[in-house]
Amino acid sequence: MFDFYIQYEYWFAATQLALAMLGMGATLKVRDFVAVVQKPRGLLFGLLVQLALVPLFAWGLLIASQPATGLAVGLALCAAIPGGTMSNVLTFLARGHVALSIALTAICSFACLLTTPIVLGLLISTQLPGEFEMPAARIAVEITLILMLPLIMGMVVLTVWPNGSARFSKLCIRASIFVILLIVIGAAGAGRLDLSNFSGAEILIVLAFVAGLAVFSWLVPELLRLNGPDSTAINIEVSFRNVNLALLIKASLFPAVLGVADPVGDQVLFTLLLYGGLVFPVAAVQVFLHGKRNRSST
């Protein structure tokens, strides 16, 4: 069963993302995105946090902790990539500004085609292979097919079936969460989440990265006095990085070769998976706290 998961891991992830975007699209109208553009304060500050403050935080953490090469590359990848589409689901569950969350995901995802190589070069220039090249074409296709197309299809459902769109949205979101559960079970059963690969100090460094992102991405919107739903979107978007994209770039940087040991590449892989595992409990707390606040303010 777990061999089946490994063989089709990409399609599990793609299905989860597509279902999530389809469900959220069924709750959105074009005017929701027009409102983001008309009042761009949340969008501009969200982009600032994502594209500038996150890499600066990662740089400071790497300087302070001086981690092993594989761990440094893994954390740099997490800092260089945008928020994942899972952040859109969590923002939806926390009653945040979903249109803002999706706009941040989309813009940062396209921007990362330019910014990711720059950030990686600044953070880990001595560890990067000289032949590194961003897989831009594949990322652009995935963003289009897995993010944008299902979102548009969901918006069409809302337009042509307004009375049933809420039920359709809930079904898709629940199906997405079910597939996420299958991913967690499959990854654990396949032995890809082995904590013995890291020392306690290294696990603490990854935990500090996760907690640091969650804290400062909550503080910045609060200090800027953004409204509750906007603050929710930015906090979750910054905290929940696109691990699937990071795994794709890892495969480009450190491709697995049958029969050839690659301890650095393996450590990069485990760093990404460990981050993905640690961020879920943090996200659960964010959803609970933001959801409680946003419900009380409506």
Image: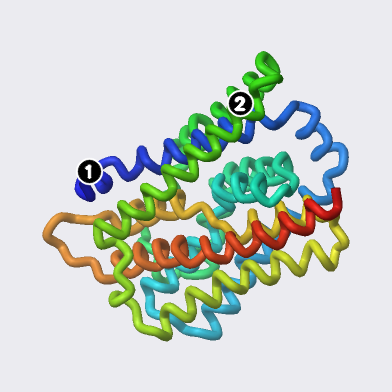
N-terminal label among 2 and 1: 1
Residue that badge 1 annotates: 4
SS class, disc 1: helix
Give the percent coordinates (x, y) of residue 18. 49, 34
Q: Is residue 195 above or below residue 162?
A: below
Q: Is residue 120 left or right of residue 92?
A: left
Instruction: Answer whether residue 176 is visible to the viewer in this image.
Output: yes
Identify the amino acid type marked 1.
Answer: Phe
Residue 59 sits in quarter: bottom right
* Residue 154 numbered mark, or none: 2
Q: Secondary structure at mark 2?
A: helix
> Residue 104: x, y in percent?
67, 46
For badge 2, the amino acid type reads Gly
At a point 44% along the width and 43% down the height, the residue shown is 178
Q: How is the image coloured?
A: rainbow
Q: Is 81 placed left or right of 218 in the picture?
A: left
Question: Residue 80: horizontal and vertical position, in percent?
Answer: 54, 59
Mark 2 packing: few (<14 Cα in 10 Å), some, or many (20+)? many
**In the picture provided, is 76 more to the left or to the right than 221?**
left
Count of residue discs? 2
